[in-house]
Image (tube, coloured by chain):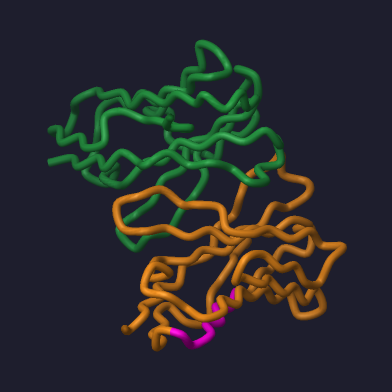
């Protein structure tokens, strides 16, 4: 079956440190990947995306890395801040399934001041 | 201005009742979705509509019936509610029918008692 799994369900980091959240996907047909942030009581919020023809994409304080060989995706957050505390989801879009997003389990990031 | 708004935010109802959740987006997007998030925060797509046409139906029980009167609205009607329907339901929209960069509403927490 399809799955997008995460290696760590929880991650605790010190403020100012860098955070790395990992994700494994299983659908080789997936060609578009997104990271979402979900704060308590809110809907998922788009952070950054990457297409399968790229292996790295940078945003403001965030970087997404894609390794298609091992079907692995990661989100790096630089200088993590208390406001980064949330649940982070990776999502994949299989190219042949009409646009649905398949979400991973989610990783809860906790930033200690 | 709220991009994707859904009402109500909270819904508590008894088993067997019929209820509706409304969703509106003011982004001018052609594609709208309903996702369900369970108690373990796992997000799974239920339906997607592109310009009022059903695109994805993820084997959701037919007690769930989406209705799209126009491309800015996608409502979810649920008949004969069951305890297992308790979850947070998220509406989302995107310009890309392949789901990229979908914007999510704040969610409706449905509790069936």
Residue B35: x %, y % from top left: 46, 42
Q: For the point 84% across and 66% down, which residue is it?
A: A54
Residue B38: x %, y % from top left: 35, 54
Q: Residue furthest top?
A: B69
Q: Quadrant of the C terminus of chain B?
A: top left
Chain shaded green: B
Q: Nearer the viewer, residue A106 or B19?
A: A106
Q: For the point 82% across and 78% down, which residue is it?
A: A69
Q: Is residue A26 left or right of residue A40?
A: right
Question: Quarter of the image holding residue B50?
Answer: top right
**Magenta run includes residue A55:** no
Residue A26: x %, y % from top left: 68, 68
Q: Is residue A35 left or right of residue B38?
A: right
Q: For the point 40% across and 84% down, which residue is it?
A: A15
Chain shaded orange: A
Q: Is residue A35 left or right of residue A95?
A: left
Q: Quadrant of the N terminus of chain B?
A: top left
Q: Nearer the viewer, residue A113 or B9?
A: A113
Q: For the point 40% across and 73% down, which residue is it?
A: A108
- Compared to A52, does A65 lie above or below? below
Question: Quarter of the image holding residue A100?
Answer: top right
- Compared to A88, does B112 lie above or below? above
- Compared to A74, does A43 lie above or below? above
Residue B95: x %, y % from top left: 67, 33
Range of residues picked out in magenta: A16-23
- For the stretch drawn in magenta, what is the main secondary structure? strand
Question: Quarter of the image holding residue B75?
Answer: top left
């Amino acid at each position: 079956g399809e799955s997008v799994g995460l290696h760590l369900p929880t991650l605790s980091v010190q403020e100012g440190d860098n955070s790395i959240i990992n994700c494994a996907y299983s659908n080789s047909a997936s060609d578009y990947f997104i990271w979402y942030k979900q704060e308590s009581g809110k809907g998922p919020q788009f952070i950054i995306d990457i297409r399968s023809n790229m292996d790295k994409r940078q945003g403001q304080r965030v970087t997404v890395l894609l390794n298609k060989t091992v079907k692995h995706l990661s989100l790096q957050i630089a200088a993590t801040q208390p406001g980064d505390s949330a649940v982070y989801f990776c999502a994949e879009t299989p190219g042949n399934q009409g646009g649905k997003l398949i979400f991973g389990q989610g990783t809860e990031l906790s930033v200690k001041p | 201005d709220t991009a994707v708004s859904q009402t109500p935010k909270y819904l508590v109802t008894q088993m067997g009742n019929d209820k509706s959740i409304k969703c509106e987006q003011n982004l001018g997007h052609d594609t709208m979705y309903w996702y369900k998030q369970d108690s373990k925060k796992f997000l799974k797509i239920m339906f997607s509509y592109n310009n009022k046409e059903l695109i994805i139906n993820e084997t959701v029980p037919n007690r769930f019936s989406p209705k799209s009167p126009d491309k800015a609205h996608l409502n979810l009607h649920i008949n004969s509610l069951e305890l297992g329907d308790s979850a947070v339901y998220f509406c989302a929209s995107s310009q890309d029918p392949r789901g990229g960069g979908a914007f999510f509403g704040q969610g409706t927490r449905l509790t069936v008692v």
